[in-house]
Image (spheres, coloured by chain):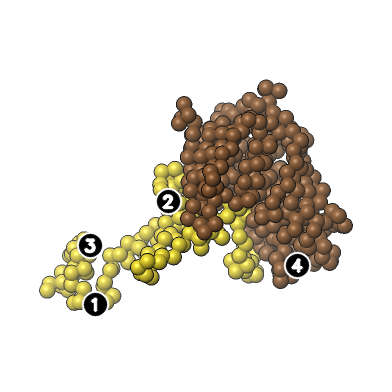
Amino acid sequence: MESRSLVNFSGHQYLRQRLVLSILTGKHVRIDKIRSEDKDPGLRDYEVSLLRLLEKVTNGSVIEISVTGTAVLLKPGVVSGGPITHDCPLSRSIGYFLEPLIMIAPFSKKPFQLTLRGITTDDNDLSVDLIRTVTLPHLQLFGISDGLELRIKRRGAPPEGGGEVQFLCPIVKEVKTLNFVDPGKIKRIRGIAHAVRVNPQFSNRMIDASRSVLNRFIPDIYLYSDVYKGDESGKSPGYALSLLAESTTSAIHCSEAASTPGENPEDIALLATRALLSEIRHGGCVDRKHQSLVLLMMVLGSEDIGQCRMGEPSVRTIQFLRDIKIFFGSVFNITPADPTDSSNTELLYSCLGTGYVNVNRSLA
Amino acid sequence: IMYADDEKQISSDDKEEFDEDDEDDVPAWKIGLAAKASAAFEDLNRRKRRKDWVAMIYSSSLGPEQIVNGANATGVKPDEIDDDFFRVNSSSAANQDDLDMTKEVLSPGALREWEDEGVLDALRTLFITGDHGDGE
């Protein structure tokens, strides 16, 4: 019994997705050889913090970390949700912690009211702006919408952070089957430029630089300069531009670049803008950074064939598909979206939903 | 040696053997012809034929990076420095790159292609304002 429900992995990579899949399936997961060859072996502070956070949002979870920190065992409990506050370490941004929680929050016993404090934008994980404007709309595709919200109360740039967000997520009994095969045409571009504890003109400079490239494509461009002042602007100076392009069928592609020392706002804006164009060219109905989320929700969908057109899978997505097979036994069929056009690299991902039902909810 | 005369009739397998055995007598350009040919063929094939994603993801032992970047572009290279005792641990060098992060690292170099007007114009068809060739 014990061995049947235990899944083993090695290495520190892909930790978040494995913990998420473990919690959703109830299967125990043991991960060993975590940076065992590294000169600084074991779990990092942010990984331990994530485990603690997962402990907070669940009830009855058992987490065992070996003395050296190179192995961890998770016996997941039920997702309980409710009001929770967590201080994220400054080694990773809030996005690192929020991304996995978004995957499990809809299947909670009580709706999530999660307050996270820390860094709100960096170059590693989705910023709170992209999560609010891009990630959450992706959940709406699966019928998770009423009361879904991310409030950015304070911004916090690295290294000192000081930001705060509140994530509200409704609970669902089950998620809808997805059938999203028409990417449509890009009809509008939206963006958020923010600058905290630096010259407020930086936002406008980013917007001007970005428009100099984007104006040629489409008239419907609105780049918003988001102003946070005083206590709301966190502890460190920083600025960033987040962009998204929405199609006629509500497919969303996004990109983002955050300030680094020595770069001027124009360069940051051009980086984000060009990354958006690359993302648009990549095609499909789902942004590369959201492939995993959409594929997971497709697996959790009702027992029907779900399908979605996307670009080629990213490195992370490939491992995610493999891990999904290990935990759920679900296999995706991946075929060329347009077999007649050999230059088209878009793919059609389809799978049979597992008919996942939120059992935590029925207990309430 | 009959090699030069018989060249046309010799099957590719035989030729390979000859290449290996009589390397000294063969002109430099003929060395490893079979390998070159097969490499070129593979290259062409790869471009022509689409990747079989299902097989690569679920039934191959290739790492995710290898699948995306092509099997030949493996990061595993034979150690060229043969110091007896000390071996450079490549995993610690790669540590920076394998952070569990969702965003891909933006490379200003790779994005520089967008400075080109032609590349920008090629994207127009994906916008509602672009020309779709269907007389919108």
Q: How far apart are marks 3 and 2 (CA)?
A: 30 Å
**Chain label for disc 4:** A
Residue A33 locus on image (x, y percent): 48, 48
Chain coloured yellow in the rendered structure? B
Q: SS of the residue at dot 3?
A: helix
Say which residue label 1 marks: B27
Q: Which mark is residue A52?
A: none
Element assignment for label 2: loop
Label whose residue precedes the other's in the sequence (2 or 1): 1
Query: Picture quarter containing residue A99?
Result: top right
Q: Which amino acid does label 1 sit on?
A: Pro
Please identify the quarter of the rendering in which residue A194 is found. bottom right
For disc 4, the neighbor class at 10 Å (few under 14, some 14 to 19, many from 20) is: many
Residue on which disc 3 sits? B12
Q: How far apart are labels 4 and 3 at the CA level?
A: 60 Å
Callout 3–callout 2 Cβ contact below 8 Å: no
Q: Which residue is drawn at 35% across and 63% down?
A: B39
Q: How far apart are marks 1 and 4 (CA)?
A: 58 Å
Specify which label sits upstream in the sequence, 3 or 2: 3
Q: Mark 2 points at which residue?
A: B62
The chain holding disc 2 is B
Q: Colour of chain A?
A: brown
